[in-house]
Structures are given as C-alpha cells and as structure tokens.
Amino acid sequence: MIAIEELSKSWAAGPVLRDVSLVVKEGDVTALVGPSGGGKSTLLRCLNGLELFDAGTISIAGHRLAEGGHPPALLERLRRDVGLVFQQFNLFPNMSVLENVALAPRSVARLPAEEARSRALALLERVGLGSFAAARPVTLSGGQQQRVAIARALAMQPRVMLFDEPTSALDPAMSAEVLDVIGDLARGGQTMLIVTHDHGFARRAANRVVELVAGRVVRQGSAADLLE
C-alpha cells in the first residue's frame, strides 16, 4: 500500500531525510516515532505531495511520486485516496461540523449535496459526534475537533490515512477519544501511518513501528518489540 525507496530531501540548512526506505502493507497501522527534528512530519508531507523531495520514489495507494514536481492532476487523484489529519485541526470556523465534513465530497468528488450530507452524518456518528452536526468547531473540545478532522478526511473514502501528531495538543482524556476512533478504523482494516512522540499511544494504536532519527530509519519492527 505504501512503498518508499531511498527517499532523500534537504533544506538549505542540510539534509532532513536520508535514503529512507520502508513499506506499509495494506491494513497495517504503522507508528513513525523518533526525536523532534528527525524528519517524521516532512516524510508524511512528502507522502501526500505537500513537500517535494530530491531523490527516491514513493508508491502509495496505487500512485507513484518521483523527485521534482508533481502534476496537478496526479496530486488531485492522490489526495482522493490518501487522507491527512494534521496536528492542528484546521477546521473551517465559519462552517458547521457537518459542513466541514461534507465539503470535500461535494466540491471535490462532486457528490450531490444530499448524498454528501448523508455521508458526513454517517461519519460523524461513527466518530461519536452525530449530535454535534450543527455545532461550530469553536464550541467543541480539542478531542472532539480532532475527531471531526478525522471524519472529514474519511469523507473522501481514502485507501490510506496519514496522521501527523494527532494527540500532541490534547490532554490524556481527549487523546483516549482519538485512540478509540483510530482503533475502530484499524479493526475495519484501514491502512494508517501515524507520526507520534507518544510511545504509549503508539503501543496501543499501532502493530508496527518505524523509528526515524536525523532523517534515517534506524529501527523498524513490531510495536511490542520496539516499544517495550
């Protein structure tokens, strides 16, 4: 589902990713761990086409990315199949929770408004927020906003879900809410790659772990082996 081969990227200050190679199989939940500044979030952004890279290749959800620029048509197809949930929720404050979730199916996938609305409502029920459909994001807790962000990403029915530090801005109770949703997705066979600093969260959420240090993969294996 995801195959990264010898991926490298540099900023003006120096390399941030160095010959990164890893595989995420279909249905796997893989946690990407390691110290701050190690390249984890940059790698995730490369997978969604938000960052360009200098060398190597990425195959993800049937799409292939190579060094240099990516054609807009490729990025549009890629982002239909690869959902990304950010650390900061990035919800539209002027829209209701329901409108946030229904927006992409209606405007990108061109679903009829009623079908997009029905899909959004079903996803909000799935993440435990059906009763908050009419609410504005600002009235929700951090954990609830992150669950809305997950529902919004799922609304495009992606084959792969990417999470960038989904619980770093949340307290333990709110983190548990997000973990419950990710656990439900895992039981449904959703392929996921999760960047996190929280080894406890990684141990509970993932079946595989990849450790990235100074832009290099230094260890990878089962969560039980690497995090105990």
Image (cartoon, grey):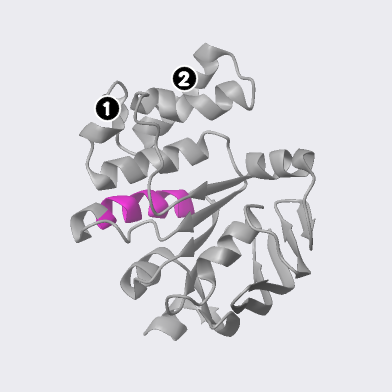
Q: Chief secondary structure of the magenta span? A: helix
Stretch in magenta: 175-187
Question: Quadrant of the rendered structure where residue 151 is?
Answer: top left
Q: Which mark is residue 40?
A: none
Q: Based on the picture, tell me whether residue 194 belongs to the magenta stretch.
A: no
Label 1 crowd (10 A; few <14 / some 14-19 / many >=20): some
Q: Which residue is mark 1?
A: 132
Q: Is residue 130 visible?
A: yes
Q: Amino acid at mark 2?
A: Ser
Which of these two is toward me, 206 or 80? 80
| Residues at discs 2 and 1 in contact (Cβ within 8 Å) | no
> Looking at the picture, how far across and down is residue 129, in whole percent?
30, 33
> Looking at the picture, how far across and down is residue 58, in whole percent?
74, 62
Question: Quadrant of the rendered structure where residue 100 is?
Answer: top left
Q: Residue at x 77, y 50 (%)?
A: 70
Q: Residue at x 53, y 55 (%)?
A: 162
Q: Which mark is residue 118?
A: 2
Mark 2 or mark 1: name the one nearer the start of the chain.
Answer: 2
> Looking at the picture, how far across and down is residue 164, in whole percent?
46, 58
How far is disc 2 from disc 1 in space, using C-alphas? 15 Å
- Element at badge 1? helix
Image quadrant where one finds the N terminus: bottom right
Q: Amino acid at mark 1?
A: Phe
Which of these two is toward me, 169 or 13? 13
Label 2 crowd (10 A; few <14 / some 14-19 / many >=20): few
Vertical side of 123 occupied by 7: above or below = below
